[in-house]
Amino acid sequence: MFYKIIIECGHMGAGNGLERIWFIKGENPLVVLQKARKLPRVKRKETSLAIKLIQEISKEEYISGINNYREARLYQG
């Protein structure tokens, strides 16, 4: 199964952060939640409060999301 996750990230001080979209493979939403809490820059790793959305997506959406992320990183340098 493939999931799109929106997570609050960043260490910009109390109450400040930015939301980032991740694309993760997992057996079920609970496994994905556990993986998401271990991702870099996730705020409040000890809780699940940083996880804003877990949405199951198709394999095509997953591949497209991963490719778009890679392209964006190439353009940023």
Image (spheres, grey):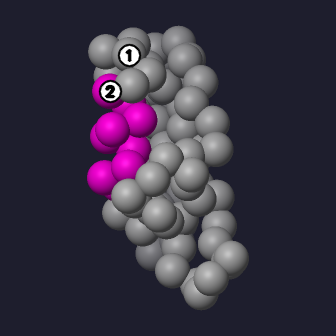
Task: Give yes or no for contact between labels 1 and 2 (Cβ–Cβ under 8 Å).
Answer: yes
User: Can residue 67 be seen here?
Assistant: no
Kind of residue at disc 2: Val
| Residue 42, magenta (yes or no) | no
* Residue drawn at x 64%, y 44% as measured from the top left: 52
Q: With respect to residue 16, does 42 lie above or below?
A: above
Q: Which residue is drawn at 35% across and 63% down?
A: 40
Kind of residue at badge 1: Asn
Query: Residue under circle 1?
Result: 28
Q: In this view, does 47 lie above or below 9?
A: above
As measured in the structure, the alpha-carbon distance from the residue carrying label 1 to the one carrying label 2 is 6 Å
Q: Residue 41, image x and y in percent?
A: 42, 68
- Quadrant the N terminus occupies: top left
Q: Residue 9: x and y, percent? A: 53, 65
Which label number is shown at residue 51? none
Task: Report crowding for label 2: few under 14, some 14 to 19, many 20 or more residues within 10 A (C-alpha).
Answer: few
Which residues are drawn in magenta?
Answer: 31-39
Q: Is the magenta stretch mostly helix, strand or loop?
A: helix
Q: Mark 2 points at which residue?
A: 31
Residue sitting at x 64%, y 72%: 17
- The correct choice, above or below, for 11 with respect to 57 in the image is below
* Magenta segment includes 32: yes
Q: Quadrant location of the C terminus?
A: bottom left
- 24 vs 18, left or right, is left
Q: Residue furthest right?
A: 15
